[in-house]
Amino acid sequence: MRIALVGCGYVADMYMQTLPGLSGLSLAGAYDHNPDRLRAFCEFHAIPAYASMEALLADDSVQMVVNLTNPRSHHAVSRRALEAGRHVYSEKPLGMTMDEARDLVDLARAKGLWLAAAPCNHLSDVVQAMGHLLRTDSARFGRPLMAQAEMDDGLVPFLRPETWRSISGAPWPARDEFEVGCTLEHAGYQITPLVSLFGPVRRVTAYSTCLLPDKVRKVGGSVISPDLSVGMLEFDGNVVARITNSIIAPSSRTLRVVCEHGVLSMADVWEYHTPLRFSPTGMTLPARLTRKVEKYLSPILPGLLLGRRLPVRHGRRVPRTQGGHHMDFSRGVAQLAAQVARQATVRMDAALALHVTEVTLALQDGARSAGGVTMQTDLPHDRMAAPIVPRE
Ligand SMILES: NC(=O)c1ccc[n+]([C@@H]2O[C@H](COP(=O)([O-])OP(=O)(O)OC[C@H]3O[C@@H](n4cnc5c(N)ncnc54)[C@H](O)[C@@H]3O)[C@@H](O)[C@H]2O)c1
């Protein structure tokens, strides 16, 4: 599958760092409407630069466009690529509204093209291992009851984000991030694994607010979006998930699934090599230590502290990207490419992207959805099937 990148900003560097070693992909070149960024990026990575979007789409060798532009450009760029007969893999969100997202899904369907959107972290070996264990070892874990999913990034506005740079020199787009809002930007990193584990979300009840409106003005912006959202997601089988998104609360990207016999947990859903643990209580080491010390109980047994570490078979070592995460940004692109070539089970597609977008928007609009909103989109129930991601 010959791909071309559109958007040569902060995240594009992370795609470039994770593309090597994934089979089935070859990079034709890249385009950005900012000529300075285009030059810096293509020179840094020594790849061809397209002079325009027209030039990119005129290259018949390009089969898939990987849309790495800012969220508010996603719809226009993806639409243009689909109209030109290209498969599209888009960064999240698929669109800024359900109308935009549905328009792309309808267009892809009408043209017989593939469309999918990031995040792809449900393809990580650790999320897949969790799903496999929940499906196949109910005697050990019991029925899943609830999940706690956190996507809190700490007090980002006070971490000097204006100084952050990608490896080719792109500044972190603070204004864009703050105006779009952390829920639209990040909730998918938890929704996608949750949907992969439990199927489609049936109902969302949420609250969202903006606690630090001044941060937007300080970076030259004017659109105020939530910087905190908390939601309850309801799944079939009486499974519920509490999800939080913020750039306020202390950094935590944990995903914990509480089952009848204990808690399966991973410390960071961005980390594809994060350990998968199981413990009867799900208590963390500091919490246990504090409790034990407080109560002056008998000596602590180390094996009980963190919970037992469970084996995960890692198909490929994910390179560390900017910021120190082993996050395989490009795995979704490779999965989509493999699906196009009919080698793989469907794990990244328009239906998933649309559903994740609907749940994300319900969380973002939390203040207006008091009492809960019923999701209109659905997913085929084959989401638990093992993915076939191309391996090295
Ligand atoms: N910054 C991160 O750490 C990060 C991580 C994961 C995902 N993402 C996602 O990646 C996407 C891009 O984010 P980013 O941080 O790289 O932003 P960015 O602003 O650094 O880069 C986006 C680039 O797209 C270009 N662009 C915008 N509209 C365009 C158009 N119509 N045609 C051509 N080029 C266009 C811009 O000039 C810019 O260089 C977003 O959807 C974001 O949610 C970002």
Image (tube, grey):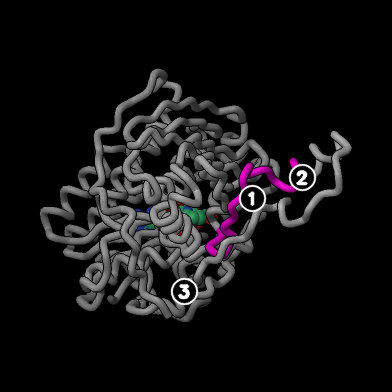
Q: Which mark is residue 281?
A: none
* x and y, in percent, of residue 243 in the image: 50, 37
Residue underneath mark 3: 315
3 or 1: mark nearer the eye:
3
Question: What segment is highlighted magenta in the picture?
Answer: 271-288
**Secondary element at image label 1:** helix
In the picture, measured across the screen, residue 271 lies left or right of residue 103, that is right
Confirm whether the magenta stretch covers residue 320: no
Of the four image quadrants, the one with ligand 1 is bottom left
1 or 2: mark nearer the eye:
2
Residue lying at 35% horizontally and 59% vertically, measured from the top left: 67
Q: Nearer the viewer, residue 27 or 357?
A: 357
* x and y, in percent, of residue 318 in the image: 53, 71
Is 364 drawn above or below residue 280 in the view shown? above
- Quadrant where the N terminus lies? bottom left
Q: Residues within 10 Å of mark 2 (few under 14, many from 20)?
A: few
CB atoms of marks 1 and 2 within 8 Å:
no
Residue underneath mark 1: 162
The amino acid beneath tag 2 is: Pro
Q: Residue placed farthest to the right in the image?
A: 296
Q: Is mark 1 within 8 Å of ligand 1?
A: no
Separation (CA) of disc 1 from disc 2: 33 Å
Rendering quarter of residue 30 = bottom left
Residue lying at 11% horizontally and 53% vertically, measured from the top left: 110
Residue underneath mark 2: 286
